[in-house]
Image: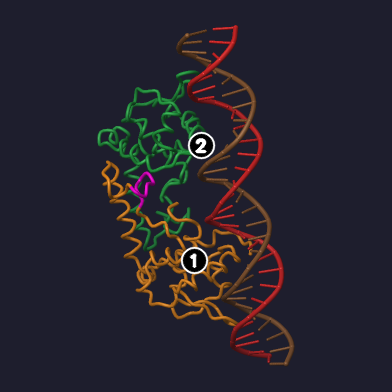
Chain colours: A orange, B green, C brown, D red
Amino acid sequence: MIFCKTTEYALRIMSYMAMNEKKLYSANNIYENLRIPFRYLRKQLTILSKSGLIFSVQGKNGGYRLSKNLSEISLLDIIHAAGDNQIYNECFFGFQSCAFKKKCALHYKWEVVIESINNVLISTTLEELKKTGTPDCISKNSLIFTKNK
Amino acid sequence: MIFCKTTEYALRIMSYMAMNEKKLYSANNIYENLRIPFRYLRKQLTILSKSGLIFSVQGKNGGYRLSKNLSEISLLDIIHAAGDNQIYNECFFGFQSCAFKKKCALHYKWEVVIESINNVLISTTLEELKKTGTPDCISKNSLIFTKNK
DNA sequence: TTTAAATAATACCTGGAGGTATCATTTATG
DNA sequence: CATAAATGATACCTCCAGGTATTATTTAAA
């Protein structure tokens, strides 16, 4: 897979919360729908809060809500918020100092791949996902997970 | 990074060995040029041997040699030989059962990305890498590694 | 004001990828 | 045949992403 699990979780969480940008989602609600391991989910929600993409309301009836407009949150923003800083700019062979500086055959082909990835991540916002129904897809798929709260 | 370290190592090793397809490369030689941790390199070479992409000659003056023509070894072959079986066909959100079956917004965009990756991996052979000088790139870059045999 | 339902903080556990260490086996060559 | 130079097999070590457990804090509402 391209992303690590933690990043995947963040992408699912944010996409799910995009279904209703005004709503305060409790960790319980998110768990019930996404089936991400509960305690780990809690931890991630706190991290996402600190990143500023969402904010938390403590106390009874508390929860989390998006803190920006859907159109202002890109997939790349979410990936960064999840703490995934290995940006996709390495050379095919994993060299830091090779890619896009020296010439090699794969260089050009791979550059196209990397650019297409970055392009999707930067240009796709939660607004677009919501419009096209992606969050529903997330939620439905979540049913394949087993319950182990 | 897209690939795990072990896969990266396999890609570098095979690309390096493509420089001279008739030559028997000792683990020492490969280590001196690629600076992959020596004992781990030895292990990986054994694994690659078992995969059939290369074969080993034991005893004094032994080593490893490619067991197919350069044109018959694709990058994807190498990735598989390295034991990397998470083929790049998952849905953006990491679901096994979503991608390319159900519809979601990212589905289409991401399908293009995945296809471009697979396309590079399948269509690029060691022959092409050799022609265009990639193995030299590998070898030069290896100099950035520190010696800790 | 007490309680219950929520998040926050913190420390710990675990499996597996990446890496190391040791000894066994094979084989060219003096 | 003895030796040295190579690979093979196997067991172990280490770190960290992913996951768990516990206690503290906040706040709505009975």
User: Which secondary structure lies at badge 1?
Assistant: helix
**Which amino acid, by three-letter code, is at mark 2?**
Tyr
**Which amino acid, by three-letter code, is at mark 1?**
Ser
Q: Does the magenta run of residues contain A92?
A: yes
Q: Does the magenta run of residues contain B100?
A: no
Host chain of mark 2: B
Image coordinates of residue A119 in percent, x first then y, are 31, 60
Tell me if mark 1 has few (under 14), some (14-19) or many (20+) residues whose alpha carbon lies within 10 angstroms of its own: some
Image coordinates of residue A140 in percent, x first then y, are 49, 64
**A62 with respect to B94 (left or right):** right
Tell me if mark 2 has few (under 14), some (14-19) or many (20+) residues whose alpha carbon lies within 10 angstroms of its own: few
Name the quadrant of the C terminus of chain A.
Answer: bottom right
- In the rendering, which numbered label is found on residue A44? none
Quadrant of residue A126 within the rendered picture:
bottom left
- Considering only vertical position in the picture, is A148 above or below A101? below
**A28 with respect to A19 (left or right):** right
Q: Nearer the viewer, residue A32 or A1?
A: A1
Magenta stretch prevailing secondary structure: loop
- Considering only vertical position in the picture, is B37 above or below A11? above
- Cα separation, mark 1 vs mark 2, equals 42 Å
Image coordinates of residue B26 in percent, x first then y, are 44, 26
Host chain of mark 1: A
Q: Say which residue appears at 47% left-offset and 75% top-offset.
A: A54
How many labels sit on residues?
2
Q: Which residue is mark 2?
A: B40
Q: Which residue is mark 1?
A: A139
- Considering only vertical position in the picture, is D28 above or below D21? below
Image coordinates of residue B12 in percent, x first then y, are 39, 38
Q: Nearer the viewer, residue B143 or A9?
A: B143
User: Which secondary structure lies at badge 2?
Assistant: helix
Magenta segment boundaries in residue numbering: A90-97
**B104 with respect to C21 (left or right):** left
